[in-house]
Amino acid sequence: MHDSDSLGIVSPQRMHFDSPLSLRSGAVLDSFELTYETYGELNPAKSNAVLICHALSGSHHVAGVYADNPKSTGWWNNMIGPGKPIDTRRFFVIGINNLGGCHGSTGPISINSKTGKRYGPDFPLVTTGDWAETYARFADRLGIDCFAAVIGGSLGGMSALQLALDAPERVRHTIVIAAAAKLTAQNIAFNDVARQAILTDPDFYGGDYYSHGTFPRRGLRLARMLGHITYLSDDSMASKFGRELRNGTFAFNFGVEFQIESYLRYQGDKFADQFDANTYLLMTKALDYFDPAQDCDGDLQAAFARAQADFLVLSFSSDWRFSPERSRTIVKALVASKRNVSYAEIPSSHGHDSFLMKDDYYHQLMRAYMHNISI
């Protein structure tokens, strides 16, 4: 059995919610939909559900492949499936496209029933707190009182942490990977430059590019190129590309000369073909706003005091976007809050993207922790 097809064919589903959702911004959505996928079977006690929270550019398609596209492997397929660290023979695994997303859940590209047009720039800003509320409503619909585990990397790790704080009785284990308790000024700066690339694109039209028949492709492409640089480490870029020239000699122009330039432009183009610019703006703002200590006068220990879950926190040695120091800050606050917490800093040369990679030590840690979760 090949790794890519160990879960086989999967299909997305949609869940509609008619009750209003009051957002942290003060806006209210009268109704909304969540697109999701599930893998494995929910046990009779409904005690084996594992929620996977996606990162900025992720989606509900976490594992398996789609019948109409054999290349459409889920973004965490190496982690989830029969016999894999998150074992679908044991756990009922759920991937949800966050509210505000562009992969089926209600977001800027969705039709606003009040206007008959796409929401576009009228779609309100959303936070990890808003997502936590939608996760709880989703669980209610399936009769899941408490998740065996909630897991996420990067922004997904923050979403997992948020649910453990907002609905502590609903989470038994929280796995926070390559994340932070809040963004540094440098990270906020990166996000703002990425947003400015989109906002200043002539094809953006204040976010209403849908009705103008345009798309801020140049801006989104630049935003992704910038982001991608921060997801890699200097060492990984050096070993993969170095200063290698595409044609072996300088061309003395502003075209693509170095292999790293070619790679970044390819990544930017690919992303711009499959993601919505308004969603990218929303997701980066959700990152910026995340700060559970804010409501506790900056006291992270006090913020974490309401958590009831056990925690596994993982970081990667070469991740400079969300450095190990940021994870240790989370761990220290959890320990001070008398939570059960395990921590590991994983040696890796892949930078922030390490959490997506198949690394033996990383996967062994995940496998061991998941194996010890009682269901």
Image (cartoon, grey):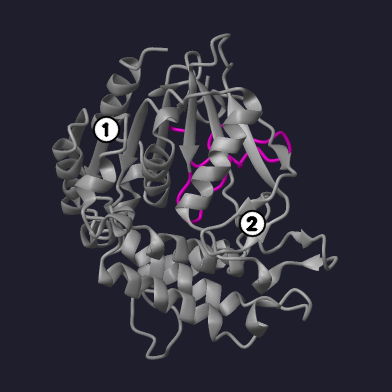
Could you say where residue 79 lies in the image, as x and y percent from the top left?
42, 31
Q: Amino acid at mark 2?
A: Cys
**Circle 1 crowding by C-alpha within 10 Å: few under 14, some 14–19, many from 20:** many
Residue topped by disc 1: 312
| Residue in the picture at 17% in, 49% down | 329
Chain-order first, disc 1 or disc 2: 2
Could you say where residue 272 lies in the image, as x and y percent from the top left?
59, 66
Could you say where residue 172 lies in the image, as x and y percent from the top left?
37, 25
* Camera sees residue 246: no
Q: Looking at the rendering, which quadrant does residue 279 occupy?
A: bottom right
Badge number at residue 86: none
* Camera sees residue 7: yes
Note whether 329 is above or below 259 in the view shown.
Answer: above
Q: Residue 103 or 184: which is nearer the viewer? A: 184
**Which stretch did the figure color magenta?**
54-79
| Residue in the picture at 78% in, 78% down | 213
Q: Residue 188 or 367: which is nearer the viewer? A: 188
Confirm whether the magenta stretch covers residue 333. no
Badge number at residue 102: 2
**Circle 2 crowding by C-alpha within 10 Å: few under 14, some 14–19, many from 20:** many
Could you say where residue 375 lies in the image, as x and y percent from the top left?
42, 12
Q: Disc 1 versus disc 2: distance between alpha carbons?
A: 30 Å
Q: Residue 222 or 338: which is nearer the viewer? A: 338
Q: Residue 307 or 77: which is nearer the viewer? A: 307
Q: Looking at the rendering, which quadrant does residue 338 occupy?
A: top left
Q: Amino acid at mark 1?
A: Leu
Q: Callout 2: helix, strand or loop?
A: loop
* Count of numbered circles in the view: 2
- Characterize the magenta stretch by its predominant secondary structure: loop
Foreground label between 1 and 2 = 1
